[in-house]
Amino acid sequence: MIKTYTIDASGKILGRVASEAAKELMGKNRPDYVANKVADIRVSIINASKTKMSESRMNETLHESYSGFPGGFKTKTNAKIIEKKGWKSLYELAVYGMLPSNKLRPLMMKNLTITE
């Protein structure tokens, strides 16, 4: 049976909501938790654009990426990510980083829906 959790992000901090979503996606709060299986849980985050974020957190937090080529190191701020791709992309990045880095991570991310 598929269980559905809804997290309202209005007035909450990004990291707190993302860690709560990551715990739910892994199934850590359920008595039938097993580390080698994806839990039958769908998580939806609503009101993502109403998240509380300070001005310094918006402009000073850097997300880094490297293409592997010389000169391919790029940094983006939270404000730049929100401007270009929206709050959904920022939440996906936060939750993705909080899930275990193994073959189950992409399968868990498929169970996450974010609405702005």
Image (tube, rainbow, N blue to C red):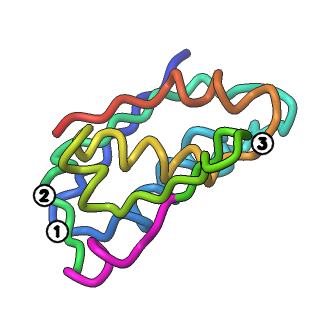
Inspect the magenta stretch and tell me whether residue 52 lies in it.
Answer: no
Q: Is residue 72 left or right of residue 95?
A: right
Residue neighbourhood size for the residue with mark 1, other residues' Cα within 10 Å, grouped as few (<14), some (14–19), many (≥20):
few
Q: Nearer the viewer, residue 75 or 20?
A: 75
Residues in magenta? 55-63
Looking at numbered disc 1 in the image, what kind of residue is underneath it? Gly
**First in sequence: mark 2 or mark 3?**
2
Real-space Cα separation, disc 1 to disc 3, in angstroms:
29 Å
Residue 101: give its label.
3
Asked if disc 1 and disc 2 are in contact, CB closer than 8 Å, the reply is: yes
| Element carrying mark 3 | loop
- What's the residue at 23%, 50% (across, down)? 82
Between circles 1 and 3, the one closer to the viewer is 3
Residue furthest to the right in view is 36
Residue 80's image quarter?
Answer: bottom left
Looking at numbered disc 2 in the image, what kind of residue is underneath it? Lys
- What's the residue at 23%, 41% (across, down)? 84
Inspect the magenta stretch and tell me whether residue 58 lies in it.
Answer: yes
Reading the image, the residue beneath label 1 is: 11
| Element carrying mark 1 | loop
**First in sequence: mark 1 or mark 2?**
1
